[in-house]
Image: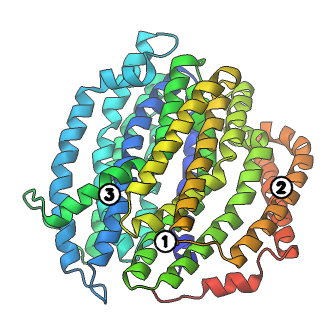
Amino acid sequence: MNLVRATATIGGLTLVSRVLGFARDMLMARFVGAGFASDAFLIAFRLPNLFRALFAEGAFSQAFVPMFSRRLGPDGELGPARRFAEDALSVLLPVLVVFTAIMIIAAGPVVLAMTGGFRDGTPEKYWLTVQFTRITFPYLMLISLVSLLGGILNSLNRFWVNAAAPILLNISMIVALLFFRGATDIETARAQSVAVTVSGLLQLLWLMWACRQADVRLRLRLPRLSPDVRQLLKVIWPAALGAGAVQFNLLISTSLAARFLEQGSVSYLYYADRLNQLPLGLVGIGVGTALLPTLSRHLGQGRLAEATHTQNRAIELVLLLTLPACAALMVSAVPLIRALLQHGHFTAGDTIASAQALAAFSLGLPAYVLIKVLTPAFYARSDTKTPVRIALLSMLVNLIGNLVLIWPLAHVGLALSTAISAWVNAALLYIVLHRRGHFTADARLKRATVRLLGATLVMAALLFVLNPFLDPMMAHGLWRRIIGLLVLIGVGALAYFGAAIGLRAFTLGDLKQQLVRRRG
């Protein structure tokens, strides 16, 4: 599948998921706000999300997809690939069951270690977080099985099925907020916790159905550590740390906010990160998901020049879409959050605090996306150790930055430190690939980058002038908010793409050429 087409497929479905996610966050802000109950739920949800990012969607996918792809026949016959998937499932399932049971039993000590009992020392908040953690943690087991089935479908170029699965999470949580919320914010947050686990079950059923449609039927076997599974496990552990650096950084930030900052800080970081994750999900995850099997095939067939060309075009594509998003989220953070979240329990003060965190997070947005594009070059070569070493170094940078910046900048310092560590991670990935001769930025990419930066500056200047006129609209009724958002986004997009075309950062011919399907 052509990289742009695959990215568009994944990104389009991710857009649907993210739009529903924002609808969910708007409802949560309205009915729960940014305080006692929301902090408890968000910390409880962070734990299974962390392990999901590390072992399910992160490490498992990065390790499993190249190995599965290499075992496919020349015309897509499953053969040895199916047996490999069954062996992996036979080991993965019992491990997940045991691990989930342990985490549910040990939820109390885990939450205590993560939050220090919270800054205010309120026992009710601590025990509420423990309760929510026990409700949400089965989601990890379910979503890990989803990841295995999704990896199979991605290897078969059926990207859309796995990309659509997160939509079910947002639908479940929206339904819980609209129809099962309680009379208090605590009861509503509890309904959200139940919805998380229900969504995991729905996603698993969806992927099982899709695999049957693709004539992929896995049989449950007795656990067997075959040589292929041993190799998979060997690759997963370093990949977990490599793929989860950003998630670890967010966990550290959340933990410090719970321990040392005022009530609501955990929620400010969450809402800011959710908005910051939108372009990451649309662009970075889409390109990275499509890129890994493509690079694996190119390298497996000795087509090194094509692999380098594909990665150059991938970086060009993500910069085209990420640089304006970065600038817009930084310059217009206040009106964006005011329009999307300032309802009901979510106050104007919450808007300002969340917008400050969003501006800091957004500084690292291009780096977050570049990490998603650069790491497949290592995994496609079965090198998971190098990304993990780099990830560990970036985590150290993040920890030092957190401890230095939290005192003068509070929650904003935590977000800024996350952005800085992401740039360290991305820069080191590029340097290592370049030194090994595995990747070189070609003249087209260098030229496009400079011109895209120029177009981004033009757009940012225009948004800065426009903000004072549009921000007052964002605190009024629904239609005025919608009109304000459409003007903000529309003017920004026209300014950016107009400047990019004027500066010849790209041409319509370039895009047309990339949209043409190429084999391999």
Give the label, 1 or 2, closer to the camera: 1
Q: Residues within 10 Å of mark 1 (few under 14, many from 20)?
A: many
Give the label, 2 or 3, closer to the camera: 3
Q: Secondary structure at mark 3?
A: helix
Q: Residue furthest left?
A: 222
Looking at the image, which residue is at 55% across and 50% down?
A: 425
Q: CA distance from mark 2 to mark 3?
A: 39 Å
Amino acid of disc 2:
Val
Q: Which mark is residue 291?
A: 1
Q: Position of residue 141 (x, y in %)?
A: 27, 46
Q: CA distance from mark 1 to mark 3?
A: 20 Å
Q: Which residue is tagged 2?
A: 487
Amino acid of disc 1:
Leu
Amino acid of disc 3:
Val
Please, which colouring scheme is shown?
Answer: rainbow
Q: Which residue is tagged 3?
A: 146
| Left or right: residue 121 compared with residue 31 | left
Q: Position of residue 398 (x, y in %)?
A: 56, 36
| Relative depth, front residue between 486 and 82 | 82
- Which corner quadrant of the image does residue 301 belong to? bottom left
- Which corner quadrant of the image does residue 511 belong to? bottom right
Looking at the image, which residue is at 44% across and 70% down?
A: 292
